[in-house]
Amino acid sequence: MPGVSRSGRGRGAACGNDLLTDVAVGPAVAFAAGLLSFLSPCVLPLVPSYVGYLSGMTLEEVSGRRYRAIGHALLFVAGFSLVFILLGAGATALGASLRYHKLLLARAGGVLIILFGLYTLGLLRIGLFDRERRIHLDQKPVGYLGSAVVGMVFAAGWTPCIGPILGAILALAGSSGQLRHGVVLLAAYSAGLAVPFLIAAAALDAFRNWFQRFRRWMPWVHRASGIVLIGVGLLLVTGEFTRLAGWLQGMTPEFLRKLL
């Protein structure tokens, strides 16, 4: 009986740690990944053009009619968030079908994320990401609904810069094996990409001034993205991702632990 009790406690602790990992650690990593995607060389410089394209206004007009720009930006964000979340649900469903190999799946996901990190650092070539994947729209669909469609197109044909980071989050979602956790991860990733985009739409002039100062740091952000991906991959491969959750559990307030 004592042996069974210890085993039960061990399984319960493991399940609790896995849950805390997905709830506390995973979304934070996914949100940071979204921010890094926004700061990538194939997204950040194009933000003012995207805002003008969505709203159908020149950059000068956007500043005077920012509520219209924000409305279009919100629907654009909703469009790409929907696609990303559906991708996350699909990756998680695949992981759930392999739940009996969860440990192996986590290790394989970690290796995949490390490869994405090496590609981002320029140390590895992956042909799939060397080809331009964006879908170009010669003319935006009319109205606010058209901005949602453009957001979905943006997500479906992500650029090589976003691909490795998004792929890493999808691998993390697949290794979780639980639909709710996969949806939360991709929602957090979408939020990391969406929040700065909405801020830029609301204050486009300030964003353009900030970008002129920030652009010299973009290569370093790209390298940092690769290092972060490699770090997350190593945590998964070594099993330290779950151990990190146990450490966070001791720092989590009691009320939050009850919610989890």
Image (cartoon, rainbow, N blue to C red):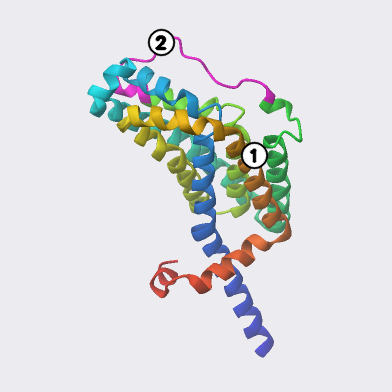
Which quarter of the rendering shows the N terminus? Answer: bottom right
Query: Which percent across, then down, holds residue 121?
Result: 69, 37
Query: Which percent across, then down, holds residue 210?
Result: 42, 33
Query: Which percent across, then down, holds residue 61?
Result: 27, 18
Asked if residue 98 is among those painted magenta in the image, a careful observer would answer no
Q: Residue at x 36, y 15 (%)?
A: 141
Residue 195 appears in the picture as rendered: yes
Q: Residue furthest top?
A: 138
Q: Mark on residue 139? A: 2
Helix, strand, or loop for circle 2? Answer: loop
Q: Mark on residue 7? A: none
Which quarter of the rendering shows the C terminus? Answer: bottom left
Label 2 crowd (10 A; few <14 / some 14-19 / many >=20): few
97 over 144 or under it: above or below: below
Tell me the magenta residue range.
130-147
Q: Residue at x 67, y 51 (%)?
A: 231
N-terminal of the two: label 2 or label 1? Answer: 2
Helix, strand, or loop for circle 1? Answer: helix
Q: Residue at x 33, y 27 (%)?
A: 205
Q: Mark on residue 223? A: 1
Q: Nearer the viewer, residue 139 or 1?
A: 139
Query: Which percent across, then down, holds residue 190?
Result: 46, 40
Residue 190 vs residue 97: left or right? left
Tell me which corner region of the image, top left, top right, bottom left or bottom right, holds residue 239: bottom right
Q: Nearer the viewer, residue 130 or 78?
A: 130
Question: What amino acid does circle 2 point to?
Answer: Gln
Question: What amino acid does circle 1 point to?
Answer: Arg
Asked if residue 140 is among those painted magenta in the image, a careful observer would answer yes
Q: Marks 2 and 1, how far apart in space?
A: 35 Å
